[in-house]
Image (cartoon, rainbow, N blue to C red):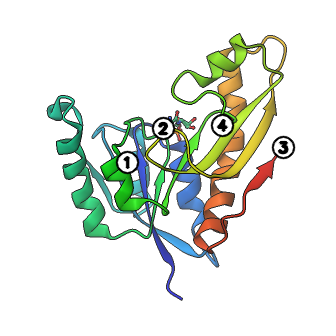
């Protein structure tokens, strides 16, 4: 069977994207076909290009909040590269139900909280404010509802005395880098059973 084609959407430095790229070698059932960003300056684009992966960007700013028009433009490079699986990896634009519908059942996201806790932004600050003893990250299938959809994996970390948003985010990010490649490998092989780490 030919390997699954994976497109990865990013908005920033793309450390999760890089762990996904680096995992897709050898007997892995998938290969990267595109790294796409809503920010032409996203640091991850140059890093992906340096690894020989096709990159593209569609700046969301000129669309001035016209989400449908932005997504129509975003769709073009995706249709051209014909991915089987779409991975959101630090992609910070909310996608419409219409966009999601085109990739439903083959789009994954990583979110820095133990969903269903803390959908949306500022997850680390919210976990600290709540006095949580543990925190973590989730990989889930993307559905029209924000940070919802079937959970494919979670990794837990302790919240430690004296943690700041930064120290906690860094501890979670280490686990994100274990969890996302593990879930993608399984998912690309057709196995949607969840993985729990930590
Ligand atoms: C990651 O922590 C990811 O979970 C989070 O953004 C960071 C991106 O880092 N994603 C979200 O908050 C999505 N709502 P990276 O660019 O180094 O992978």
Q: Residue at x 66, y 65 (%)?
A: 192
| 149 horizontally vs 9: left or right | right
Q: Which mark is residue 133?
A: none
Q: Where residue 14 sits: x, y (%)?
A: 48, 43
- Relative to residue 182, is residue 64 drawn left or right? left
In three-dimensional space, the C-alpha distance between marks 3 and 2, rounded to whole angstroms, equals 25 Å
Q: How many marks?
A: 4
Disc 2 versus disc 1: nearer the observer: 2
- What crowding class fits label 1: few (fewer than 14 Cα within 10 Å), some (14-19), or many (20 or more)? some
Residue topped by disc 3:
198
The residue sitting at 75% across, 56% down in the picture is 195
In the rendered image, which residue does mark 4 sit on?
115
Of marks 1 and 4, the one in the foreground: 4
Image quadrant in which you'd find residue 65: top left
Give the SS element for disc 2: loop
Considering only order in the chain, which callout, 2 or 3, is on the residue closer to the N terminus? 2
The residue wearing badge 2 is 146
């Amino acid at each position: 069977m030919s390997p699954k084609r994976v497109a990865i959407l990013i908005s920033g430095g793309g450390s999760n994207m890089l762990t996904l790229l680096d995992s897709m070698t050898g007997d892995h059932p998938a290969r990267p076909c595109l790294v796409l960003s809503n920010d032409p300056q996203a640091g991850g684009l140059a890093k992906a290009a340096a690894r020989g992966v096709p990159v593209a960007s569609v700046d969301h700013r000129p669309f001035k909040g016209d989400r449908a028009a932005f997504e129509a433009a975003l769709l073009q490079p995706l249709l051209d590269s014909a991915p089987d699986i779409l991975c959101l990896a630090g992609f910070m634009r909310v996608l419409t139900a219409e966009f999601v519908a085109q990739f439903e059942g083959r789009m994954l996201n990583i979110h820095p909280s133990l969903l269903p806790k803390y959908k949306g932004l500022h997850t680390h600050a919210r976990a600290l404010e709540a006095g949580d003893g543990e925190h973590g990250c989730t990989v889930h299938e993307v559905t029209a509802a924000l940070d919802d959809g079937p959970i494919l994996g979670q990794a837990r970390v302790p919240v430690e005395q004296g943690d700041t948003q930064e120290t906690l985010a860094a501890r979670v990010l280490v686990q994100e880098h274990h969890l996302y490649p593990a879930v993608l490998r399984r998912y690309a092989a057709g196995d949607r059973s969840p993985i729990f780490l930590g």
